[in-house]
Image (cartoon, rainbow, N blue to C red):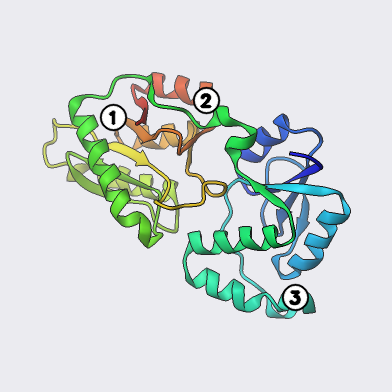
Amino acid sequence: MTGRTAIIAGEGALPGLLAEALDAPLVYAMEGFAPPIPATSFRLERLVPFLYGLADEGVTCVVFAGAIRRPRLDPEAFDPRTATLVPRFLAAMQAGDDGALRELIAIFEEWDFEVVGVTAIRPDLVPGPGVLVGEPSEADRADAARAAEILRVTGPLDIGQGCVVVQGLCLAFETLPGTEAMLDFAAAHQGLRPVAAGGRGVLYKAPKPMQDRRIDLPAIGPDTVAQAARAGLAGIAWEARGVMLLEREAAIDAAEAAGLFLWARE
């Protein structure tokens, strides 16, 4: 990568982890979002002036990092040049999260910015295959396989990147409210396990099939471990090389303390 790098930051630990690995990056955040590091805010309704500003700062590379929600656009806030993009914005948003993000990448690339993924900057955040802590049982491995199959089928529908499977049954599925809401639901419905003394269940996460992995990779971290423990699950599994593990050592320590396994599944 040559030139300056800009981080388009959302919430969570990821923007800070990327900033640590870059040489004096410029950090920006959409208005209404509060990343954990100092950031200059911008409005999507003024995207074209923002892109001009990036070019003026010598930015050639852009990375999107952190959680964001769909912004509510104010029709009166659009500048004339960004207003010409409104039909594209609306069509992309109606196509789902993946479609909206693909369109956003396309716009940045049309302005000659290189959009890179997390793995280009911090490949260590995306583990390869292996069990990091604990040991999944045969029942856990069967639940993870079932969860992976569920996400392979639902992924093209652009619904979510995670699910909870208990004894072969889907107890909870990630939708718009996100992983925390899914695990809260799983915690509230632990009594639905078919066999009370049987397998405790697995949280499984994976990217959507055909997803552009430069943006919106699923992630887990210490908070996810704590939520999975409250839900009474046996552990967390994910697609190897397709999911970010944030605050790795803290997540492993938390899983070990809670008696959960962490498994990057091939």
Residue 13 seen in this snapshot: no
Mark 2: few/some/many CA within 10 Å (<14, 14-19, 20+): some
Q: Which of these two is toward me, 180 or 206?
A: 206
Mark 1: few/some/many CA within 10 Å (<14, 14-19, 20+): many
Residue 122 location, quadrant: top right
Q: Amino acid at mark 1?
A: Ala
> In which quadrant will I find the N terminus?
top right
Q: Which mark is residue 206?
A: none
Q: Amino acid at mark 2?
A: Arg
Residue 22, image x, y percentages: 74, 33
Marks 3 and 2 in Cβ contact (< 8 Å): no
Tell which circle, 1 or 2, labels the residue nearer the N-terminal end. 1
> In which quadrant will I find the C terminus?
top left
Q: Amino acid at mark 3?
A: Ala
Mark 3: few/some/many CA within 10 Å (<14, 14-19, 20+): few
Residue 25, image x, y percentages: 78, 40
Q: Which residue is mark 1?
A: 234
Which residue is outermost to the right?
56
Side of 169 relative to 263 (left or right): left
**Nearer the observer, disc 1 or disc 2?**
2
Residue 56 seen in this snapshot: yes
Residue at the spot 81% in from the left edge and 66% down from the top edge: 49
Q: Secondary structure at mark 1?
A: loop
Side of 50 relative to 206 (left or right): right
Q: Which of these two is toward me, 113 or 258?
A: 113
Q: CA distance from mark 1 to mark 3?
A: 48 Å
Q: Which residue is mark 3?
A: 77
Q: Which residue is mark 2?
A: 248
- From the viewer's perspective, is residue 70 above or below residue 262? below
Tell which circle, 3 or 2, labels the residue nearer the N-terminal end. 3
Tell which circle, 1 or 3, labels the residue nearer the N-terminal end. 3
Residue 118, image x, y percentages: 60, 39
